[in-house]
Amino acid sequence: MHRRYQSRHAATAVPTVGRATSAEMTHSVPVWCCGIVLLFGGCSSDLPNPNANDATENVMGTVATLSTDEADVCEFALRFALLDELSWIEPDQRLFLAVGLSADGKWLDPAPEFLRRMADLSTELQPASEAEIKVIQRVADTDILRVEDPLNGNHCYIHYVTINRWHNDKEVEVTVGTDGGTLSGAGYDMVVEKHGGRWRFKAGTRREFIE
C-alpha cells in the first residue's frame, strides 16, 4: 500500500527526553486512528504480515540486539508516540511493543530490560510476539489479518519503532507507528536528535502516514 503523507511542521521541539518518564513529556501527539480500519479497494498493507498463511500465529519472537544509543532512541520514540494514547486506554489494556524488523520482515521484540525501563507507564507492556496475528478473511487470494490480544481476543495494535538511518551520532531518522493488521495502522517518520546527553524530537521533521 502506498503511504498517504500529511505534512506537519512543529513550531517547537518537545522537552528533551532520554530515559525520562512519561510524566516529563508534555507535547501533545495526535491519537493514531486506533480502532479505525481503513477499507479502500486495491490497497494492501505494507506493514509486515508475519506468517500470513497461518490461521493464528503466536510464536516466540526474536529479541532485538540494540546498542545503548539505539535503546535510548527507541525508548524516547515509543514514549513520544504513546504519550497521548496512554491518557485514554483502558486500565487492563495491554500494549505490545516492537523495536525493529528482522531481515524477513517480522517484528523484533524488545529485551526484558527494555520493558523494565518503561515500567513506569500506566499499563502492562508485552513484546510484540505475545500478540496473535489471525487471518480473518481471504479476499482475492490475499489474507486479511487482524492483531489480537490472546488473553481476551480483542483487536489490538503492535506499537513499533524502527531506526531507519543515522545522520551522525547525534541525529537519527526513525519511524513510529501501530500495526493492527491488514489496512489497520498509522504512524509517522521523524528525526530525533541528542542534545545535552538526551534525545528529543527535532522540530519540523514529522511526516504522518496511514497504512
Image (cartoon, helix red, strand yellow):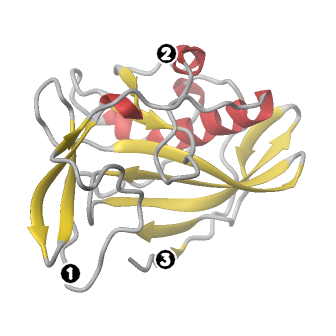
Quarter the N terminus occupies = bottom left
Q: Which amino acid does label 3 sit on?
A: Gln
Instruction: Identify the residue at horizontal 21%, vertical 32% (top origin).
Output: 149
Q: Give the Cα separation between the discs numbered 3 and 1.
A: 18 Å
Q: Dividing the picture into quarters, in which one does residue 150 lie?
A: top left
Q: Is residue 77 placed above or below 185 in the rendered structure? A: above
Q: Would you name the residue on which mark 2 appears?
A: 120
Q: What element carries label 1?
A: loop
Q: What residue type is labelled 2?
A: Asp
Q: What element carries label 2?
A: loop
Q: Would you name the residue on which mark 3 appears?
A: 6
Q: Dividing the picture into quarters, in which one does residue 117 lie?
A: top right
**Label 2: few (<14), some or many (≥20) within 10 Å?**
few
Compare marks 1 and 2 and give the one earlier in the sequence: 1
Q: Are marks 1 and 2 in contact (CB under 8 Å)?
A: no
* Drawn side of residue 25 relative to residue 155, left or right: right
Q: Give the Cα separation between the discs numbered 2 and 3.
A: 32 Å
Compare marks 2 and 3 and give the one earlier in the sequence: 3
Instruction: Identify the residue at horizontal 58%, vertical 51% (top origin).
Output: 103
Q: Give the Cα separation between the discs numbered 1 and 2.
A: 39 Å
Q: Is residue 162 placed above or below 25 in the rendered structure? A: below
